[in-house]
Image (cartoon, rainbow, N blue to C red):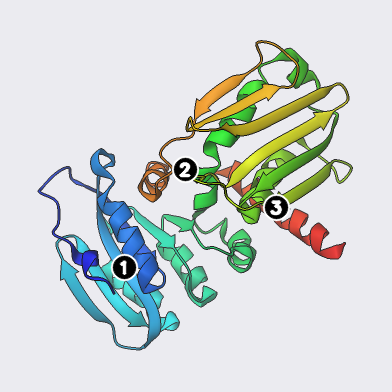
Amino acid sequence: MSANLFAAPPPAGPALVATVIVIGRPEHLDEAAEALRGLGDAGSVRTILISEGARVTPSSEVSGDTILVSDLAPRYINNAVASLRLSSLPAVVWWRGGSTEALGGLAELADRLVLDVDDPEDVWTHAVGLFDHTVVTDLRWARLTRWRSALAHLFDLPQVRDAAGRFESVTIDASDVPAARLFAGWLRSSLGWTSNVRIAIRHVEPGEGMSAPLAGVRLTAKGLVISLRPKPGSGCLEAGVDGADGCLRIVPLGDGSLASFIGEELAVRTRDVAFERALAAAREIRDAETDK
């Protein structure tokens, strides 16, 4: 575990707003701890960091509002969380990897479960069964917020709204293929698409300075093409109808930092049905790709 994990705590600030339990490999805990320290005005959190290992007896260190539990066997993670969380604060589990053995028990203890792993397919399979036990989301959903918002705003245009039921295909270029599946799942579940709408996801290497999970989205219907793409060098996203003057929307992509995304998640308390439907559809899209 790197030394910066227990960097000097910030001076006294706002009251604690939540307990955030981060579970993952040591290097992922370092990164998460730094992000939580960077929340600033978003509010202070009580942080519990748990790394997975083989220990059956927790070994813990405490520094300010941060508790580190190292090398804990997966079957004991739920017990550690139950004993360390505070009933007076909402409990958010930030899952950054490890055995899925503990997920079911964590869902019973957490007010919110935020998934954040490189390859989410296995954890997504488990997540669908947890929707009725806690609020579940994925940090990819936060990373797609501005993409979803930019596209949704285009549906204020009459020609786009009229085409909602006759889209023929969507092509998504992405450095993060699971994020592209989640975005496509959102489209399918929101617009009621059947398998007749062709979905093509193409993996691309991230460009220089590129932090967005997607590199471009193109939706086609008869007589209508919608494009979304980052505007080079601007930190903004362009969304528009090809060939239609006055139909361009430009929105900032934000700073793309881990702190900003987890800050967004900590501000949400309610169940996100749109995410749940998008995730279920994303898994259907993956299954269809596998069957080809």
Say which element carries label 3.
Answer: helix
Residue at x-position 62% and y-position 59% = 128
Q: Badges 3 and 2: C-beta atoms under 8 Å apart?
A: no
Q: Earlier in the sequence, mark 1 or mark 2?
A: 1
Of the two numbered discs 1 and 2 in the rendering, the one whose residue sits closer to the viewer: 1
| Quadrant of the image occupied by residue 250 | top right
- Using the image, determine if residue 251 lies above or below residue 158: below
Disc number for residue 282: 3
- Please state if 209 lies on the left or on the right of 225 as rendered: left
Disc number for residue 270: 2
- Please state if 220 lies on the left or on the right of 40 as rendered: right
Q: Earlier in the sequence, mark 3 or mark 2?
A: 2
Q: Badges 1 and 3: C-beta atoms under 8 Å apart?
A: no
Residue 145 % position (x, y):
53, 38
- Using the image, determine if residue 95 lies above or below residue 215: below
Residue at x-position 54% and y-position 50% = 140
Quarter that holds the C terminus? bottom right
Amino acid type of disc 1?
A: Leu
Mark 1 crowdedness (10 Å alpha carbons): few <14, some 14-19, many ≥20: many
Amino acid type of disc 2?
A: Thr
- Using the image, determine if residue 211 lies above or below residue 64: above
* Residue identifier under label 1: 49
Residue 190 seen from this side = no
